[in-house]
Amino acid sequence: MSFRIGIWDHCRYVVNREKPYDEMARHLERMRNAGVTLTNIYLPEVPSLSDYCRAAANCGMQLEARITPEWAGKDVVKRTLPEELWKDMEAKHGIRLSGPCGNHPGNRKAFVEGLKLLTDEYKTQLNAIHLDFIRNDNALLLQDYPCQCAECRKLNQRFFGVEVLTAEMLQKPAIAYKLVALRNENVTQTVQELSQVTHQSGLELSIAARANYIDSADITAPPVWGLGPAVLEGQDWVQWLDKGYIDAAYPMNYHTEVEMFKSLVSDYLRLLGGKAFTALHIGVGVMSSMGVNPPEAVGERLQILKDAKLPGAMLFNKINTYTDDYCAVIKSIAE
């Protein structure tokens, strides 16, 4: 079985955004020559999806379109809090993190409708749909600052008898359990509905998975603020693979410490068993919030995954461009 190397792309290298084809084609051709056979494009930043599809096809690249709940529309409901709690979050953690609320049915409806439009137009030009941020905000912040949007207030009133949970209530194990269960049920329902759309269109569905599934190696300090745990955020990606809701998971294992990287790989192999050898494409960081992995470190990680007989790997580089030394390392592993 071949070892497939892919890239998460944002088109940040494109200068002429009115006529981007030539630049996209040059970039993808260069990466294809380096042994990359899959590209995963972030739709909110691609200047022209049609041109990108054509550029990928012309160099023989498989193509996934990467979407997020926020991509679905302007009316997406994000985590809602009173100003005093935002200030408290910022004082404790140095950030105000406000992603789309995974409990909100309106967010789900918009996401599914947006995907239907996308697949209707591009299903013959894509190989898969890729879900990014298919979860709630970082678990580190969710524990003390759960969403207070109208839909979350309704859930709280039904299950706990109050619209807003107090700090004392959040410490009770039963309440904490139900909050996590609700997040997982609601995000899973969204994944199920998206899965139906993609599979009916003849496309596969993959996700960018949180690196820490339950209790794996983690980094909670800024600017990472935690790699999960995925299940606390409503992203039970192991269950989604077991149930067939998704076809592949790309855990974002961008660690710069190789022993931590290896530890997560071992966890994934234990969690997925034989399914890992068809569905697991582990993410490798080049430049990310965790730091920089130089070419030799990227090569070491790719070789670890290849030696484990996994089907492939995904490279993340926040600047999107790869110097010759990185390309040489990638090519040496791909061959």
Image (cartoon, helix red, strand yellow):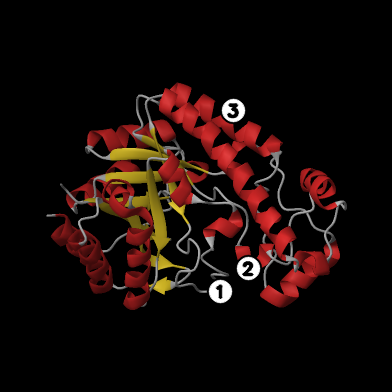
Q: From where the camera sits, is residue 98 visible?
A: no
**Which is nearer the eye, 279 or 109?**
279
Upstream in sequence: badge 1 or badge 2: 2
User: To which quarter of the image does residue 309 belong?
Assistant: bottom left
Task: Give the labeled residue for mark 2.
Answer: 140
For marks 3 and 1 on the same chain, the one whose residue lies earlier in the sequence:
3
Whole-number angstrom distance, CA of label 3 to CA of label 2: 31 Å
Q: Residue furthest right?
A: 162
Query: In the image, what residue occupies the spot 39% across and 52% down?
Result: 250
Disc 3, disc 1: CB below 8 Å? Answer: no
Side of 122 relative to 80 (left or right): left
Distance (Cα) linking label 3 and label 1: 35 Å
Q: Amino acid at mark 3?
A: Glu
How would you rate the neighbour count of disc 3 (Cα within 10 Å): few for under 14, some for 14-19, many for 20 or more? some
Hey, what amino acid is under mark 1? Thr
Indicate whether 138 appears above or below 91: above
- Of residue 210 and residue 323, the one placed in the foreground of this image is 210
Residues tagged 3 and 2 counted as in contact (Cβ below 8 A)? no
Q: Is residue 297 left or right of residue 234?
A: left
Question: Which residue is identified by label 1?
Answer: 220
Q: Is residue 54 left or right of residue 251?
A: left
Give the total number of marks visible in the rendering. Answer: 3
Across and down, in percent, residue 81 comes to 80, 58
Residue, disc 3: 113
Give residue 288's mark.
none
Residue at the image point whose x is 37% and y is 75% from the top: 260
Looking at numbered disc 2 in the image, what kind of residue is underneath it? Answer: Leu
Q: How many neighbours does mark 1 have within 10 angstroms: few (below 14), some (14-19), or many (20 or more)?
A: some
CB within 8 Å, label 1 to label 2: yes
Work out whether 117 lies above or below 128. Answer: above
Disc 1 secondary structure class: loop
The location of residue 255, given as percent across then percent down, is 39, 71
